[in-house]
Amino acid sequence: MTLDSRGWIHDESASSYLECSLIGIIHLCSIYYLTYLTFMGHTMLEGKMKDSINWGFIGCGRVVQTKSGNAFRSIQDSSIHTIMRRDIQKARESAKLFDAKFYCDNLHDFFSSEINAVYIATPPGLHLQQASACCKMGLPVYIEKPLARNYVEAKAIIEMFEKQNVALYVGHYKRALPRFKYLKSIISSSVIGKVTSVHHELNRVFSYEEATGTWLYNPILSGGGKFYDIAPHSFDIISYLFGDIVDICGIAKNNGTLCPLEDSVVCSYETSQGIIGTARYNLISQKKFDRMFVFGTEGKMEFSIHGDASVIVERYHNNGPTLYSIPDPEVVEQPMVQMVIRALQGEKTDALRGRDALNTYWALDKVLDTFYHGRDDDFWNHNERWNGKSHV
């Protein structure tokens, strides 16, 4: 890996995805900038932002363009001011798409623009450095999932923001969708009685093009395979509906695809509410499938976590199931983004704060620990250990 004059990291194997800045630049300017912000009374802490929120985006790829970006300008006193991308032409195009006033390809110019909050939407392998830079500048951050490559990095990010008393939110946006709000109300009102167990099944079709042409299957950037990319939403919904996971064990395997990462995962767990659960992920299926089954003392229900299929609720003594269609909003991340914005403006909301997301990454690492022969170090640099192989 090398650093160019603008501070971007370059790696011949994944140069088009390594949108990371030279942290040394931040050390040179952070003391002056934080002193200025504090003196002017604009240190960006949760609930203390009296002015309009001017968002700066670090990264602006497909997720931002299709799932989240428009949400940041859909609410009063919130706008997209600056977009930073490694490719200055792409930054210019993204700025035009979102009516941003400024675009750049480096953090020095990014922090020099008139932003007072940051949305990080780059690969998780870059999150620790980029979040650290924002924290040093006193800027609140909304960061995409996965939060980091492992529990150690996730914990470091969270503790950094807590120490500086700067707001941090994580993009586990599904818990904010109307469908899951409704499901939580069903559970809390005991429509199906006391919940005793849950089971989740998910299939995804393996794409060789995705595996070889994107950062998703490069653990230096992604932190794992397809499971690690998709499971944060699954585990967060478990936590939201049934309580944090307090005990979990699992097995992950690679079944011979050209990609050497986990493609089959099973796990069992218990939550803080005493609910037991199981899950199975088949990431090399020929057909997509996604269904969670919830069993209670008086009924059961089923729904999709990663799609918007109808919710099915059945009470054992009624004459059959009832279907509820609760579609996602057009901009699927909008409910969570709006809660983050309202929280920064001083309102009490259910926006997911950093500390509340940490349980997900602890659980993920527990499930994948044996496959990677440990995940509390730079396992992404040691493929000789993957698939449960011994150290060499």
Image (tube, rainbow, N blue to C red):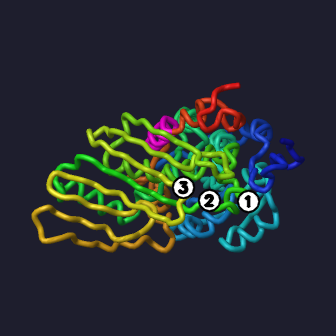
Which quadrant would residue 38 be assigned to in this image?
A: top right
Q: Amino acid at mark 2?
A: Trp
Q: Residue at x 28, y 67 (%)?
A: 312
The residue under label 3 is: 283
> As shown in the figure, which amino acid type bears the numbered disc 3?
Leu
Q: Is residue 369 left or right of residue 90?
A: left
Residue positioned 69% across, 52% down in the render: 258
* Residue 208, above or below 377: below
Please state the horizontal and vertical placement of residue 63, each as a whole percent of the image. Answer: 61, 63
Circle 3 residues within 10 Å: few <14, some 14–19, many ≥20: many
Does residue 198 belong to the magenta stretch?
no
Main secondary structure type of the part rendered in magenta: helix
Question: Which residue appears at 66% of the width and 39% of the height?
Answer: 136
Residue at the left extreme?
317
Closer to us: 191 or 292 = 292
The residue tagged 1 is 213
> Bounds of the magenta span?
355-367
Mark 2 highlights which residue? 55
Task: Characterize the local packing of mark 2: few (<14), some (14-19) or many (20 or more) Cα atoms within 10 angstroms.
Answer: many
Q: Nearer the viewer, residue 381 or 110?
A: 381
Q: Quadrant of residue 329?
A: bottom left
Q: Given the current orientation, which residue lies at the most extreme front position?
A: 256
